[in-house]
Amino acid sequence: MAKILVVYDNLDNRNILTRLLSFGGHDTVTASDGANALEQAALTSPDLVLMDLAMPEMDGWTATRAFKEDDRLAAIPIIAVTGHVTRLEIERAQNAGCNDLVSKPIDYYVLMDKIATHLSSSAAAPASPDGTGGFPCPA
């Protein structure tokens, strides 16, 4: 299917995500922080990125902005992974350039649906900076 870069600082969570993705037929590449994610993406050309937002060293917001500023990486869809699903967190992810968001604990079927949606798009549309597009905000 697709090559997905899993960016997560917690090894156990990274391993769980890679197993879920493998079960769904995807190949995975991993990174433990944002800086390592940029290196891995340049080396492996993933089709999609699952980006934890709260990480030491280079966090997911900073890494996502760096992806979107790099012509080689800008078109790769990025799905934020976070346990803090508030309006502010969603807006921060959208403003950083994330294309979507999945909340923790992760629902396998929701995750696979979001991945399929972004992989099937002919060109990944950037998140809307004005909050009118992108992924839904809670009421």
Image: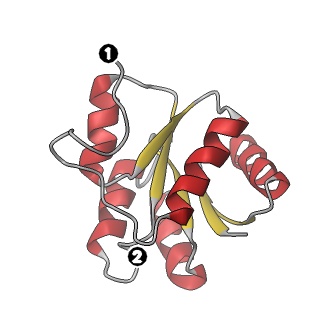
Q: Quadrant of the N terminus?
A: bottom right
Q: Residue at x 33, y 43 (%)?
A: 93
* Nearest to N terminus: mark 2 or mark 1: 2
**Rendered view: 64 above or below 15:** below
As helix, strand or loop, the secondary structure at mark 2 comes to loop
Relative side of 33 to 71, left or right: right
The quadrant in which residue 90 appears is: top left
Dot 1 crowding, Cα within 10 Å, few <14, some 14–19, many 20+? few
Q: Which residue is mark 1?
A: 139
- The residue that label 2 is drawn on is 73
| Rendered location of residue 75, percent (x, y) | 39, 72
Amino acid under disc 2: Leu
The front one of 25 and 35 is 25
Residue depicted at 29% across the width and 52% down the height: 127
Q: Position of residue 31 (x, y in %)?
A: 60, 62
Dot 1: what SS? loop
Quadrant, the C terminus: top left
- The residues tagged by marks 2 and 1 sit, at their Cα atoms, a distance apart of 32 Å
Q: Amino acid at mark 1?
A: Ala
Q: In the figure, is residue 129 to the left or right of 96?
A: left
